[in-house]
Image (tube, grey):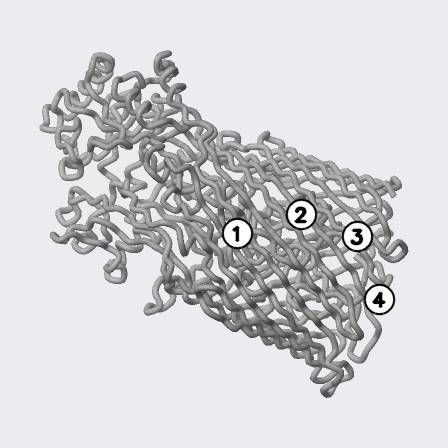
Amino acid sequence: MSVLSRPPRRHHLSAALLLALGTPAAAFAQTTDAGASDARTLDRVSVTGSRIQRTDIEAALPVTIIQKAEIEAQGITSAEQLLQQLNIASSGPDSLAANSGIAPPGTRGNNGVSGANLRGQGADATLVLLNGRRVAAHGLAGQVVDLNSIPFAAIERVEVLRDGASAVYGTDAIGGVINFITRDNYQGITLTGGADVTQEGGGNIYHASVLGGWGDLDDDRWNVWAAVNVKKNKILRGNQRDFANSFQPSRGLSPDSRGTPFATLVTGSAASNSDDNLIGTGLIDPVTGLTKTSINTLDLPGGPGCESGGDMMGPYDDKIWASPGASFACAWDYGRARTIQQPVESVQGIGRATFKIGDNHEFFAEFMGSKVTSKRQFEALQITTRTNPSDSALDAYELNANTQATYDAIYDQLLGYFGNQAGLNYGSPIAYRWRCEICGTRQIETSTKAYRLLFGLNGSVGSWDYNLGLSRAQSDAESRTAGGYYYTPQLKAALKNGVLNPFLMPGQSQSQAAYDALAAADASGLQLYSGTTATTTFDASFSGSLGFKLWGEEDVQAAAGVDLRREEYEFTGPQEWADGDAYVYGPPGDSANYMPKKTRNVKAVFAEFNLPVVDSLEVNLAVRHDRYDGFGGTTNPKYSFKWQPIDWLVFRGSYSTGFKVPDFAKLFRGVTETLYTGLDLADPAVCPNGQYNPDVPACSAQIRPDIISGGNVHLKPEEAEQRSLGFVLAPNGNFNVSVDWWEIERTNTIRSGFKLTDMTANYPLYAENFIRDANGNITAIDNRYINTGGTLTRGIELDANVRGELAGGNWNVHLNGNYLDTFKTKSFDSVPYSSNLVGEYERYFNLPIKWKHTLGLGWAKGDWAHTLTQVYRGGYKDWRPGGVVNGYTPEHWEPKVDAYVTYNYSVTWRGMDNLKATFGIRNLLNTDPPFTVRYLDDGDGAGWEARVADPRGRSFNVLLEYTFQ
């Protein structure tokens, strides 16, 4: 990395301090010449986080700048991979592996979407820019930018502002800002191709790109360049990795799934069923005296055992899940059956034409476009039958000529163990849960097209710089069924007449009539929903000297401008979904949330002042006022300082407020009432914790209320306060270190989806959310979006570099770490914050890991450059399933998840003119993800944590780049 300097002035920084402030590689060891000392004079530039253009790059705010060479040295080929290496990026469900589960209504936006999530604030609270300006949010997600749409082949560097920036950029910049900056004034043609192939198969990545540019701005007064990139991420399935294994009961892990290839009977108590004549209703174990809620005849005493029922079947561990009524149930490992990395194909393109007008003005036009196609694949349908008549309900197993033999076999096994109890009324239907493997994997294909067209004019008039831009950005996305879904009437008929048999052993085949029935019922190719986001923006900014000084040698600098935006969102789908006429079983549809095009206008003005109070002290003041249709105005200031008492030491800090407006979906999505399908709830007003237990009188009345969810037009913006304080120390050109403390407190947060376990365990706080009828019975639970509560997060970021010479080459050791000190939440404004959750398991959102770091060693000599990197993700307390909570301890139970430590190696060779070759090994030691008892029904499986670990294992990557000059 070349050392950057500027014209000397009093108290100028040493070269090392410039390096530490301006271009610390937060996650990468340096692969370029670490001892280079060639200096050049900088043009006036803007750094992310400030509108003022100036020649020095000494930032009062922590900005990480990652250069193209550093990215390529790590074998990184996408923005998602880059974010996974950043320590300030949170361990959240934002990658293609971590969001591979089924998207329920309202979260359909993660179909193939990769988000940027800094400092645990969420992908919707991290602002993503391309060349300093906004791009369109994903058409389905509504507010999250899909990193797969970023044209990575043309990226020159990535600037990451590790601080709030609502005073500069407006909404969404709470967690920070990521600015992808493309090439400028490029000439020549560069061809790039690469592959990242796993040792164990599955999850391979292939990519190729071409970049071409013509004309020189200085000589020809024009430049045009364009780039196209093609990338393919192959599928990775759970059964391709040994660590994806849910049946490890001695360690506390067993599937909580009773939908099995040989069906499990759903029995329960007489009070829990709408038809007391169901086979098995209220059956009591003659040995224990307990009511059995689920029974698989394979697991009855004397039976062949659950393992005999099919691939990935095993016993349901009632002790782990504290469900003694399910001791005769079987479970199925759909963690292994699940796709643990989505297949995604993308085509990205970007082009820019720049023309000089005179000596001080430039006009440019830029176009960016992408097409991303993902095919999410899930395990086969779990079919749950009911006896209440409904067009969408599947009937219980009935006795008829087709089912006689199977029905009698099931009945006889129940009778043989339970005896002639009232629940065994021959001829009554059998309710069950069945994993329909013959139905095939469920698949949803999502196609997204995005573009941004930008026209701009920048330059200088006298001592003032200006930048004008007019842009239109849009993202169109749709999701369709692509297999594994069936029309309910035909499926219902095939089950009712016995053509489909849910009680087959391995080696037994469904009839040809069953295959024909499924083919006739196939619902592939149906559109589930589509969405469009669009943003039209005019922005103008002006910066320059105010022509006077305070007590220092430099002038006071200022910037001011306007930002006018029109935001649009539309979410729709086939009318038959909204009318209830589609009759497809189990798709993750979202018809209740259809909305016609919604628009809002945003008007903003901003100003910024850089005040060199004395030669050693600069103070920066920024303020922005935004006015939104429907919300009114919000004003957000930012105050920061940089104090350099001596050449090799800088102190810096900031205070700011921020905001995030609710997205259209949270405001306007429809209100839905969905029947709670679990069998574990009781009235929390009379039953402690609201956990159904047929053997406890106060908890023996099972409830299955409707869950009300949806939008709220009365939502207000979220608010935030951010603080940071740090220092940079660089005593010489071979060593520098920076340390920054930060704090973010968010209030008025927008919340929904409160955990039912929290609501029942803390019933007095949530009593108003439980809707009761005239008799006091719970009929529904209101779980819509509201503004309430907040989060408090604190941490420390560390970045250090040491460099020198060895064996005729130059070496560099780089350490970047993130220490999370505090993560607290509260659900209501009236209650105090929770205890510190750092190092604790969080099931759905960001996993608050205490310490993460990247330690890199680079050595370069001649045409060769080597990089060895350690990536460390700290351990945390494991999640505890119900039985462990209640005191049960499996034989090898470990309450803590181990740290995840991997090593990456790469070597780059430049021994041939115009050719650069990089070879690397990711996860050099082929380290498996650490074991965890995590079991997420709608996530990525079990036994490992996708928010922390990369499931691909050891992989070999090669990157070839050839340039025609």
Q: Residue at x 23, y 55 (%)?
A: 770
Query: Which amino acid does the dot numbered 3 rest on?
Result: Thr
- Circle nearer the viewer, 2 or 4: 2
| Real-space CA distance between mark 3 and mark 1, rounded to the nearest whole angstrom | 34 Å
| Real-space CA distance between mark 2 and mark 4, rounded to the nearest whole angstrom | 31 Å
Residue placed most toward the observer, 409 or 498: 498
Assess disc 3: are there few (<14), some (14-19) or many (≥20) residues with their C-alpha within 10 Å of its C-alpha. many
Q: Callout 4: helix, strand or loop? A: loop
Q: Position of residue 774 (x, y in %)?
A: 13, 53
Query: Which amino acid does the dot numbered 4 rest on?
Result: Thr
Q: Is residue 803 left or right of residue 930?
A: right
- The residue singled out by tag 3 in the image is 32
Quadrant (top left/top right/bottom left/bottom right) for the C terminus:
top right
- Image height of 8 relative to 92, above or below: below
Assess disc 1: are there few (<14), some (14-19) or many (≥20) residues with their C-alpha within 10 Å of its C-alpha. many
The reply to whether dot 3 and dot 1 touch (C-beta < 8 Å) is: no
- Circle nearer the viewer, 3 or 1: 1
The reply to whether dot 2 and dot 1 touch (C-beta < 8 Å) is: no
Q: Quadrant of residue 902?
A: top right
- The residue singled out by tag 4 in the image is 41
Q: Which mark is residue 368?
A: 2
| Real-space CA distance between mark 4 and mark 1, rounded to the nearest whole angstrom | 38 Å
Q: Position of residue 885 (x, y in %)?
A: 31, 49
Q: Position of residue 962 (x, y in %)?
A: 82, 39
Query: Which amino acid does the dot numbered 1 rest on?
Result: Val
- The residue singled out by tag 1 in the image is 144
Q: Earlier in the sequence, mark 2 or mark 4?
A: 4
| Real-space CA distance between mark 2 and mark 1, rounded to the nearest whole angstrom | 18 Å
Residue placed most toward the observer, 369 or 35: 369
